[in-house]
Amino acid sequence: MSHHLSERAERTPPSGIRRFFEIAEEMEDVVSLGVGEPDFSAPWPARKAAIEALERGQTSYTSNRGRRDLREAISTHATRYGHDYDAEEEILVTTGVSEAMDLAMRALVDPGDVVAVAEPAYISYGPDASFSGGEVLPVPTEASEEFRLTYDALERAGAERADVLVFCYPNNPTGATMDATHLAEVAEFAREHDLFVLADEVYAALTYEGEHDSIATQRGMRERTVVFNGFSKAYAMTGLRLGYAMGPPEVVDAMNRIHQYTMLSAPTTAQAAALEALESCDDAVADMREQYDRRRRFVLSRFREMGLDCFEAQGAFYVFPSVPGDDEAFAEELLREAEVAVVPGRVFGDGGEGHVRVSYARSLPELREAMDRIEAFLADY
């Protein structure tokens, strides 16, 4: 029996990150710096809340939009970044930020619409746009500009013809951040050319220098922006799959209508954990951020000692050093010969070539071992 796959499915490539994981899984002594996942467990109060929810038999659907008390807690939490979103009409709880991004694309993008993606970028944005029939327009950012999105970069890429602009700051994979001054340039471009913005801010709490700034707080941007955040990174809750979106009521309502036919509602147990996380886990987040910061400084220092050019990443838990030669060949040889897994920069789009993504969401002893192996590998490379 033959199976007819859709053209959309046929042209979707496998994840470039996953291929390296699969190779690493076949090896015995690999130190993996490839995975974008905290090495911490979720804070105990959040785990306890999930357990208690199960013990109480809370295993049914919630409101499609998510528990009302959780949306109110999200609304309160978001004020620390200067946001003011109504819990009833402007917040949607989703199954991870990935679902929220997919919903937004499907709510905003028609076939033929142009979706500008600031690159290097998290690997799902392009496919999400394509699944909605959109045309992806890469907007490369430059190492010389610390991978910040600028007005000039948008202009060079021809983003004035775009309908939607997508970016992630603090950035995966570079660790770059954007301050209010730089965001003002992007906001100006978006207003001038009537772009709607999808701002993935899931790493907002992992900002090491200064405070996180959101484009939605720029003049005239709240009504043309959806902000995404979640619990996977800051609260080490990747497996619980809980995210949320905040935006204009009509857009959130459209996203919710699609959500009703796909997920119905986010996992009930995870919502209980998320509520507790927002109410009582600030200290745990601060402790994890402090440890990530210590690791960040260590990894940056070691790469610079090795002679690899690496700008000072100030957010998320990645650094993005330049490597000699072809980044994919470098990553593959490093994995096979030194048994250290990193991700080639080209996986993340234009601007990523010549770099590798290194996650420092590992313990300091593991990072020391990995850095020693990379240094020895480079000596003969």
Image (tube, rainbow, N blue to C red):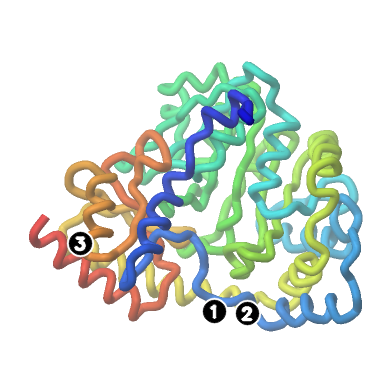
Q: Are marks 2 and 1 in contact (CB under 8 Å)?
A: yes
Frontmost of labels 1 and 3 is 3
Q: Is residue 266 above or below residue 138?
A: below
Q: Is residue 147 left or right of residue 110?
A: left
Report which residue position mark 3 lands on: 337
User: Which residue is drawn at the image coordinates 83% and 53% (left, top)?
Assistant: 265
Q: Are marks 2 and 3 in contact (CB under 8 Å)?
A: no
| Quadrant location of the C terminus in the rendered image | bottom left
Q: Residues within 10 Å of mark 3 (few under 14, many from 20)?
A: few
User: Which residue is drawn at the image coordinates 60% and 27% (left, top)?
Assistant: 8
14 or 256, which lies in front?
14
Secondary structure under the numbered disc 1 in the rendered image: helix
Q: Is residue 66 above or below residue 123?
A: below
| Quadrant location of the N terminus in the rendered image | top right
Q: Is residue 192 visible?
A: no
Q: Which mark is residue 287?
A: 1
Report which residue position mark 2 lands on: 283
C-alpha separation, residue under disc 1 versus residue under disc 3: 35 Å
